[in-house]
Image: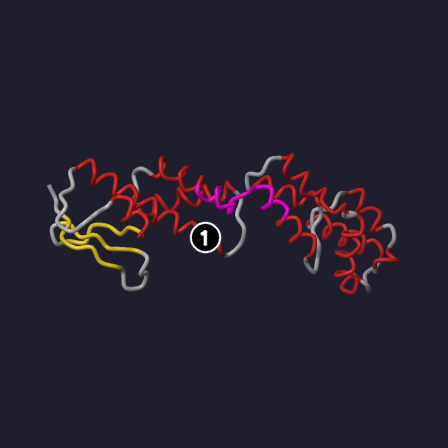
Amino acid sequence: MPVITKIEPQKKRKERYNIYLDGKFTLGLDAETLLKTNLRTGQELDGAALDRLVAEAQYERLLNRTLNFISFRPRSEKEVVNYLHQSGRKLKYENTEKLAPRVLEKLADLNLVNDQKFADWWVDQRRSGRTPFGARRIKSELLAKGLSSPIIEKALAVGGVDEFSLAEAAAEKKAAVYAKLDNRTYRLKMSQFLARRGFSWETIKRIVDNKGKTA
């Protein structure tokens, strides 16, 4: 059976330790796992024990990579799951199907993956930008990110934001660009622009029918 010949802290991450078996680096573990497993120099590891340690090391690596992934911005559960499987394939882990749910559960316990909070954040970002987006576009984006309709509708309902006011704000950003166009071309261009932003056709019609107010 392989023998642990050295345990040493990593140079860049002192909270993690490198484990050497028979003189060769085998895997890295965090301090908490090292304490739980009570590993020590000179200890022999049978095949089952080594497999458990390898699985734990892989879990920790996937967790740390995913923590970095979500540090840039909030993520939906679907985004996190997709990332976990992509990372597993890249790292050539054969047991990603078992590791991914465990990582996801840990992130949920830490409240780092929460679809309702993600939806609320996404809606706020899309509505508060320099050029707001409409509910139709926002809903489409959130559906693509794996969120359910009830969660999306709840997020869209927060704050009682008036869709027409958002469309007016978006139209004002383009009003100067379209100011010299004839009425027919103005209506076409503004309609296309607002449609791309995800506003309903009823709202768009109200905007373009009132060129004097928005242009």
Q: Is residue 109 magenta?
A: yes
From the viewer's perspective, is 166 left or right of 3?
right
Q: Which residues are drawn in magenta?
A: 106-120
Residue position for label 1: 69
Is the residue marked by circle 1 packed among few (<14), some (14-19), or many (20+) residues within 10 Å? Answer: some
Total labels drawn: 1
Magenta span: predominant SS is helix
Tell me if residue 213 comes above or below residue 52 in the rendering. Answer: below
Residue, x 75% and y 54% (percent of image)? 189
Residue 25, given in percent of the width and then of the height, sits at: 19, 54
Residue 198, given in percent of the width and then of the height, sits at: 70, 46
Pick the residue in front: 99 or 45: 45
Pick the residue in front: 88 or 137: 88
Q: Quadrant of the C terminus?
A: bottom right
Residue 75, given in percent of the width and then of the height, sits at: 52, 48
From the viewer's perspective, is 110 left or right of 175?
left
Residue 174, given in percent of the width and then of the height, sits at: 75, 60
Tell me if residue 125 comes above or below residue 157 in the rendering. Answer: below
Residue, x 31% and y 45% (percent of image)? 58
Residue, x 71% and y 54% (percent of image)? 132
